[in-house]
């Protein structure tokens, strides 16, 4: 009888440890994904501004007619940042406006279709050529 009670207590303790470990793993995954998503939201916006500024430095006197070359450079810079250039325009006022889109590197969120949009963020950047 004493052996059975000791075995029973040992299996109960193992079950408790497994539950705690499982809870910690799940919590770690949730926190990692949340952190990756928040970081992506803020960094894609910053990257869009940085790219707009870099492209504006390349713009010569007539940025409107040079739009194709500027867009190609913006696309290249976006790809370096693991982002996709969604919109690019140079206004007649000399202001460059662009939009980037990027998916966060997550463990779970990006792989579940119902919530995968949570991992995507867009950022808008503007800079003047003058």
Image (cartoon, rainbow, N blue to C red):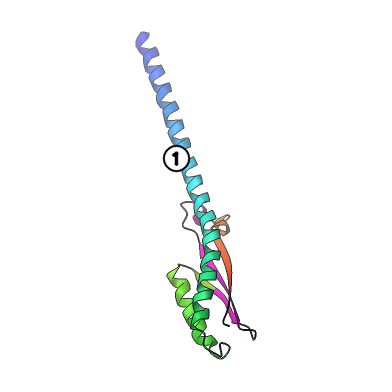
Relative to 10, is 102 on the left or the right? right
Residue at image location 45% in from the left, 31% down from the top: 20
Q: Is residue 91 magenta?
A: yes
Q: Position of residue 65 (x, y in %)?
A: 56, 91
Q: Quadrant of the C terminus?
A: bottom right
Q: Is residue 112 visible?
A: no
| Front residue of 95 and 120 | 95
Residue 55: percent from the left, percent from the top? 50, 79
Residue 39 image position (x, y, % from top left): 51, 56
Q: Is residue 92 above or below residue 74?
A: below
Q: Judge left or right: residue 85 versus residue 91.
A: left
As displayed, is residue 110 above or below residue 16? below
Q: Residues within 10 Å of mark 1 (few under 14, many from 20)?
A: few
Label 1 sits on a secondary structure element that is helix
Which residue appears at 59% of the width and 69% of the height?
Answer: 124
Q: Nearer the viewer, residue 113 or 93?
A: 93
Q: Measured from the top left, where is residue 33 in percent x and y?
A: 50, 50
Residue in view at x 54 percent, y 58 percent: 119
* Residue 16: in magenta span: no
The segment highlighted magenta reads: 86-112
Residue 118 sits above or below residue 47 on the image: above
Q: Reply above or below: 118 against 30.
A: below
Whether residue 110 is visible here, answered yes or no, is yes
Q: Nearer the viewer, residue 47 or 116?
A: 47
From the image, which quarter does the N terminus lie in?
A: top left
Q: Which residue is mark 1?
A: 25
Task: Name the residue at the front extreme.
Answer: 130
């Amino acid at each position: 009888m004493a052996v059975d009670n000791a075995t029973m207590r040992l299996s109960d303790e193992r079950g408790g440890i497994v539950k705690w470990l499982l809870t910690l793993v799940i919590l770690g995954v949730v926190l990692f994904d949340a952190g990756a998503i928040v970081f992506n939201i803020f960094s894609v916006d910053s990257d869009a501004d940085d790219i707009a500024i870099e492209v504006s430095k390349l713009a010569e006197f007539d940025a409107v007619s040079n739009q194709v070359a500027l867009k190609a450079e913006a696309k290249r810079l976006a790809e370096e940042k693991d982002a996709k250039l969604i919109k690019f325009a140079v206004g007649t006022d000399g202001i460059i406006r662009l939009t980037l889109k990027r998916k966060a590197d997550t463990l779970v969120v990006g792989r579940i279709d119902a919530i995968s949009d949570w991992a995507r963020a867009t950022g808008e950047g503007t800079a003047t050529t003058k």
